[in-house]
Amino acid sequence: MYKPDLQKEAARLSATHRYLDFDLNRDKELNELVILASQICGTPISLITLMDEDVQWIKARKGAEIFEMPRSTSFCTHAIETDELMIVEDAALDQRFADAPVVANEPHIRFYASANLKSHDGFNVGTLCVYDVQPKTLTEEQRSSLTALANQVSHIMELDYALKTLKKQNDTLAEIARIQSHELRLPVSSILGVMNIINAEQNDLNPEYLDLLNQSVNLLDEKIRMIVSYANNGTA
């Protein structure tokens, strides 16, 4: 098995886990892209993969009902080590893959091509790859199209990650606002209680000042209630 640079690989895995931990939820878009990749490249099998430390996770597939495979025997573990399109015209003649289970045994893969999925910070986190049981190659148009499709997959992944990150941040902010708002209401409630006592008793305080203070405290209480309502329900 190919041994990647450990420091570079640690950073790459950190980038990969951003998408694995959030569990991509774009099945329709990703499945459409693997179908298109197979049609363009003329291959029966196409996959969208994310490369973890020991496992290659299959996020979308056409022509193969697999959801993961060992990284140790994967074509793609070699592909992510370069930024170039990777093409293996006949795996049976390539010493890196001739003994791989999917080459030596069913389905007897012969052809492989892949374009990398790149994170926003420049790491190759996976691939859009196509397979065939017959040796072949790709035209320049097919190669550029496969690269363009892989870029589109990367954009979809980034969008999904960004939306989920934003939601998580908003949920956290809403919870902070809810807690702080409730804490603010405690002293306001105490002030309102004191104001009620003052209003109920005879005193020498200027009524206009008392009225102004009442209005200010009540306005503050109303604003805090609005914050609490928004934090709880998303509406004021």
Image (cartoon, rainbow, N blue to C red):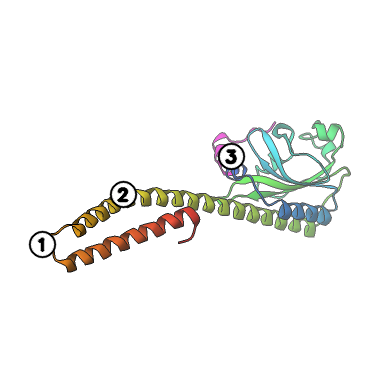
Quadrant position of the N terminus in the picture: top right
Mark 3–mark 1 Cα distance, whole angstroms, equals: 72 Å
Q: Residue furthest bottom?
A: 208
**Residue 105 picture quarter:** top right
Contact, CB < 8 Å: mark 3 with mark 1? Answer: no
Judging from the image, what secondary structure is the residue with disc 3 in?
A: helix
Mark 3 Cα shell of 10 Å, populated few (<14), some (14-19), many (≥20): some
Q: Amino acid at mark 2?
A: Leu
Please name whichever residue, 100 or 36, is drawn nearer the observer in this view of the structure.
36
Quadrant position of the C terminus in the picture: bottom left
Q: Amino acid at mark 1?
A: Asp
Which region is colored magenta? 1-15
* 3 or 1: mark nearer the eye: 1
Please name whichever residue, 101 or 174, is drawn nearer the observer in this view of the structure.
174
**Residue 98 picture quarter:** top right
Which residue was labeled with disc 2? 186
Q: Is residue 149 left or right of residue 190?
A: right
